[in-house]
Image (cartoon, rainbow, N blue to C red):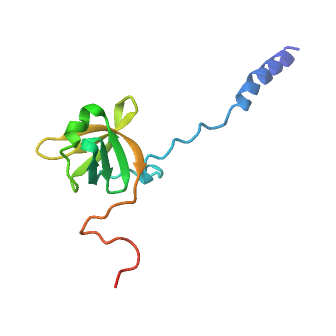
Amino acid sequence: MRILPIAALLACLSAPLAAQEPYASAPSCLSDWSCTPTRPPLGLYVSAVDAGGRYVTLEDGSVWEVEISDRATTASWQPSDFVGVRPIAAPQADYEHLLTRAGDLDQRAAVRLTGRRAPAYRADDTPPGPAAE
């Protein structure tokens, strides 16, 4: 007789769990390299710095908005500078990544992804596709 109340209790507890989604929604992709199980690149080259350091575009076409306190730093960055891209362990608001430019002094900037452009090619790269004759 005790089995029936236990079975009823288990049925009542499992009903709300069954109504929930079985999996959490997948996070949105940050860039092409974050949508796959492969590791992100160690870094990318800067293609452009716009609006006095507010936006940094990387060679893969990703456009990053720089946190206001780091814009004076990124304003001095030049196209073809190499920057590392890493997540921040303790993000500042929604600025969840860190761009690090290596040089005489490491320069860092907290950033968030704001969009994408067509990837840029450096002068020593050949764009994919048929060769122009």
Q: Tell me if residue 22 comes above or below residue 127 in the rendering.
A: above
Give residue 25's quadrant in the image. top right
Q: How many marks?
A: 0
Residue at point 28%, 47% (across, down):
50
Residue at point 10%, 45% (across, down):
104
Query: Horizontal and vertical percent for residue 128?
Result: 38, 71
Q: Tell me if residue 59 comes above or below residue 106 in the rendering.
A: below
**Quadrant where the image shows the C terminus:** bottom left
Query: In the picture provided, is 32 more to the left or to the right than 127?
Result: right
**Quadrant where the image shows the N terminus:** top right
Residue at point 31%, 34% (across, down):
67
Query: In the picture provided, is 56 more to the left or to the right than 101?
Result: right
Query: Horizontal and vertical percent for residue 106?
Result: 17, 41
Query: Horizontal and vertical percent for residue 34?
Result: 44, 49
Residue at point 35%, 70% (across, down):
127
Q: Residue furthest left?
A: 104
Query: Horizontal and vertical percent for residue 64?
Result: 35, 44
